[in-house]
Image: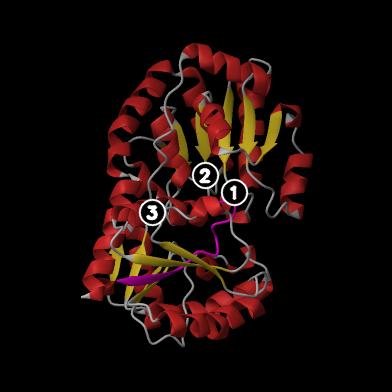
Amino acid sequence: MKIAVNTRLLLKNKLEGIGWFTFETLKRIVTTHPEHDFYFLFDRPFDTSFVFSENVHPLVVWPPTRHPLLQYWWFEYALPKVLRKIQPDLFFSPDAYNSLRLPYKNIMVIHDLNFEHHPDFIPWADRLYYRYFSPLFAKKADKILTVSQFSKKDIHQQYGIPSDKIDVVYNGANLYYRPLSEKEKQHIRQKIGDGHPYFIFIGAFNPRKNICRLFQAFDIFKTSAQSDVKLVLVGEKMYWTREMRKAYGQMRHKADVIFTGRLEPEKLIKVAGAALALTYVPIFEGFGIPIVEAFRVEIPVITSNVTSMPEVAGEAALLVDPFRVESIAKAMKSITFDTQLRESMVEKGRLQRELFSWDKTAASIWQAMEKLSG
C-alpha cells in the first residue's frame, strides 16, 4: 500500500502540539508496518531525522505554506500534481488541512475547532481561511479523526458531520517523561528559581491559553499566601499580545515570574518534573497534552473545567473556572499548603495516565487506515 502523508509540521526544533502528534504517531506507524510505502510531503527542506525508516520516501512540495494564500496553492494545486505521480492508495493529513481536488481516499485529523468559538484569537487572514475551508475539508474527508470526545461532538454539531464518520484517537505523552528524585528536583529548582518551588505553565502563548488570568491569579495567590513560590512559563511568545503585556506589567509580583522560552524535550522533562504543580488553565482545548505529561512526571495538575480538559484530567486534577482568577488562585493556594492533596492528585494521575499513550494513538490511526483502504 502507498500512503501519502502531509508532514508540513515536522519542523526541526519547532514541534508544537500537532507537530508532536505527527512525529510520535508516524514514527510508530512506519516502523511497525515496513511492508508499506509512506510518502512524506514537506513544504520546505526537511531534517533527515524525520525519515524514520527505509519505507519512508520524503518529497519537498513547494512553496512553503507561510500564508493562507500559499496554503491554498499548496493543497489545491501543488499537492495534487505530486500525488498524481505517486498514485497513493490513501492520503493522510494530521494537521486539519485537506485538499478539495484530490480523488484519493483520505483521512484528516481535526484537533479542535477553536477558531469557530474564539475567532478573535487568530489573525484575520488565517481566521477567514479556517472558517471557510474547514467545513469543506471535513465534508471532503472519508474519515475524520479527533483527539477527544469533546472535539468529536463539536465537529458533529458545528459541521453536521455524522458521528460514525468521526473516530476519537487520544493524544499521548512521551515515555521519557518520568518522575524525578528529590535530589534532581532540588538541583533543577536551584537552576530555575534559586531553589524556590514553582508552578509551571507549558505551551505557546496563544490568547486561548489564558495567560492574562494566570498572571492575575498568581498575583492574588502571592499577595494572600505570602509564599516564596514562583511561576515558570515554558514556551514561545507566539502572540505576546497587548493584553498579555498589560497583565504582566501590572503584576505586583512580576519578579517571581520566569520565562524560559522553548525548551528541548530533555530539559523540559526535568523542569516540569521539579515543579510544585502544573497550572494549565486555557479557555479552550481539544485535548491538552501538558496535562498527561504532568501525570507522567508525577506532579499535581490545576486545569480548566471547560471543553476537553475535564475529560483528559478525570479526577486527577483540581478543576477551576478559567474565567475567574479567584478560582485559579484558590487552587494554587490549596496545592501549595495541602501536602495530602498533592499526594492524592499524584496518585490519581498515575491511574489516569494509563488511558493515554502514543502507541495506542498510532494503533488507532493505523486501524482507520486499514479499514478505509479496504
Mark 1–mark 2 contact, CB under 8 Å?
yes
The kind of residue on which mark 2 rests is Val
Give the residue pinned by disc 1. Answer: 210
The kind of residue on which mark 3 rests is Thr
Magenta region, residue range: 1-16
Q: How many marks?
A: 3
Q: Residue at x 64, y 49 (%)?
A: 205
Point out residue 325 in the picture as x, y percentages from the top left corner: 58, 41
- Report the mark closest to the observer, 1 or 3: 3
Mark 2–mark 3 contact, CB under 8 Å?
no
> Earlier along the polypeptide chain: callout 1 or callout 3?
3
Give the residue pinned by disc 2. Answer: 281
Residue 104 can be seen, yes or no: yes
Q: What SS does tag 1 mark?
A: loop
Quarter holding the C terminus? bottom left
Give the residue pinned by disc 3. Answer: 25
Whether the magenta-drawn stretch holds residue 14 is answered as yes
Q: CA distance from mark 1 to mark 2?
A: 6 Å
Q: What SS does tag 3 mark?
A: helix
Q: Is residue 91 above or below residue 335?
A: below
Query: How many neighbours does mark 1 have within 10 angstroms: few (below 14), some (14-19), or many (20 or more)?
Result: some
Query: How many neighbours does mark 2 have within 10 angstroms: few (below 14), some (14-19), or many (20 or more)?
Result: many
Whether the magenta-drawn stretch holds residue 88 is answered as no
Q: What SS does tag 2 mark?
A: loop
Point out residue 359 in the picture as x, y percentages from the top left corner: 31, 47
Left or right? Give the position of 214 relative to 369. right
